[in-house]
Amino acid sequence: MKLIVGLGNPGRGYAHNRHNIGFMCLSHFARKQGIRFDRQQGKARIGTGEFAGDKLILAKPQTYINLSGESVSRLVKKFEVNLDDLLVIQDDLDLPLGKIRLRYGSGSGGHNGVASLIDALGSQDFCRLRVGIGRPISATGPDIISYVLGDFTSEEKRIINQVIPIVSEAILHFLTEGLTSAMNRYN
């Protein structure tokens, strides 16, 4: 069983925020796989399906991004998911807009949602698919919060709309060929 989680904030007001790229990518992947987010479980909207013989659970935590660990840890326990079978899609300020990176383990990199996951799971040993949202020049503290909670500009949307299908391809590659092969191809 594989659990794929997109990080983001629930609600229409956040739908197009940079911080919600995890939700956006997971929604695209779900549409391509014919999976609908039709249930609430473990403080998340979930959809289930199968791919390459594995049961898939797709989840969008509804706890707000900084408390994502509450939801994900419940889902991991409920469905008895091995952490090696968990893939988290997250935004990343330190990657240029539209760049993606897959990796296993490591710290939160300052991402509060990932820090919540690490804390709740008691481990940093899970797979991440980081999607670059870029970092505004000379922005710190409250400026960063405004940036990540801001919507993509029209130029940024053009780039993001091109990368979202690539993220879906990377997820499929991860599911069929494994993390190392996906990293070699998409990093």
Image (spheres, helix red, strand yellow):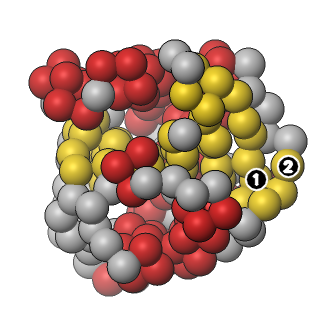
User: Tag 1: residue type?
Assistant: Arg
Quarter of the image with the C terminus is top left
Residue 143 visible (yes or no): no
- Which of the 4 quarters of the picture holds residue 62? bottom right
Label 2: which secondary element: strand
Mark 2 sits on what residue? 39
Mark 1 sits on what residue? 45
**Left or right: residue 48 compared with residue 145:** right
User: Tag 2: residue type?
Assistant: Arg
Could you say which is closer to the camera, residue 88 or residue 131? 88
Q: Is residue 117 above or below residue 158?
A: below
Q: Name the residue rendered at 74%, 40% in the picture.
A: 47
How far from the left and from the top, in percent, is residue 75?
63, 62
Whether residues under marks 1 and 2 lie with C-beta atoms below 8 angstroms apart, the answer is yes
Q: Name the residue rendered at 69%, 22% in the picture.
A: 31
How far from the left and from the top, in percent, is residue 39?
85, 49
Quarter of the image with the N terminus is top right
**Left or right: residue 162 compared with residue 26:** left
Q: Name the residue rendered at 67%, 63% in the picture.
A: 78
Circle number at residue 121: none
Q: Is residue 102 above or below residue 142?
A: above
Residue 38 visible (yes or no): yes
- Which of the 4 quarters of the picture holds residue 163? top left
Q: Is residue 40 above or below residue 71?
A: above
